[in-house]
Amino acid sequence: MNEELIAEAEIGEEARAFLQSELGRCLIGMAQQDAEEAREALATVDPTDIPNIRRLQNQALLGRRFEQYLAELVQRGNNALAIFKQQREAA
């Protein structure tokens, strides 16, 4: 159990470091830009062009999810670290 908590905390810290890095900020910006471009294109796409609508919806969703995945890893790491500390204090 402790090994899992430590591993999750380490992954969360790696995700946090990535988000703060130049590469992380660049990739987040690119994902946000892709999502915004897809949302803008959805406003003017032919409503009968179902394949294109699906493609744009997926593009917008992926752009949002990328950042959400990293934020979730950071949060899970924070939670794991808190649980680990509580267990150590209780022992």
Image: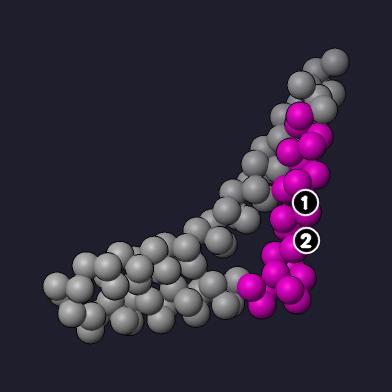
| Residue at 70% over, 69% down | 24
Magenta span main SS: helix
Describe residue 62's horizontal placement relative to residue 48 as left or right.
right
Which residue is pictured at 38% across the width and 76% down the height? 38
Residue to which mark 1 is pinned: 13
Say above or below: 3 vs 75: above
Q: Which mark is residue 56?
A: none
Q: Judge whether residue 29 is colored magenta.
A: no
The quadrant of the rendering that contains the C terminus is top right
User: Residue furthest toward the left?
Assistant: 48
Q: Residue at x 44, y 73 (%)?
A: 35
Vertical order, 10 against 37 (above or below): above
What residue span does the magenta drawing correspond to? Answer: 4-27
User: Seen in the image, is 90 located left or right of residue 69?
Assistant: right
Tell me, yes or no, whether the highlighted magenta stretch contains residue 13.
Answer: yes
* Quadrant position of residue 22: bottom right
The answer to whether the residue labelled 2 contacts the one labelled 1, judged by CB atoms less than 8 Å apart, is yes
How is colour applied across the structure in the image? one colour
Amino acid type, mark 1? Glu
Position of residue 50 measured from the top left corner of the image (x, y, whole percent): 22, 67
Is residue 82 at least partly visible in the picture? no
Does residue 45 appear to the left or right of 78 in the view shown?
A: left
Left or right: residue 15 versus residue 45 is right
Question: What is the spatial separation of the Cα atoms under label 2 and label 1, in whole angstroms?
Answer: 6 Å
User: 10 Å neighbourhood of mark 2: few (<14), some, or many (≥20)?
Assistant: few
Q: Indicate the position of residue 27 as horizontal and vertical percent values.
A: 64, 73
In front of the other: 23 or 52:
52
Regarding residue 16, the answer to whether it shows in the image is yes
Residue underneath mark 2? 17
Q: Tell me the crowding category of disc 1: few under 14, some 14 to 19, or many 20 or more residues within 10 angstroms, Cα based.
A: some
Q: Give amino acid for label 2.
A: Ala
| Residue 1: x %, y % from top left | 76, 21
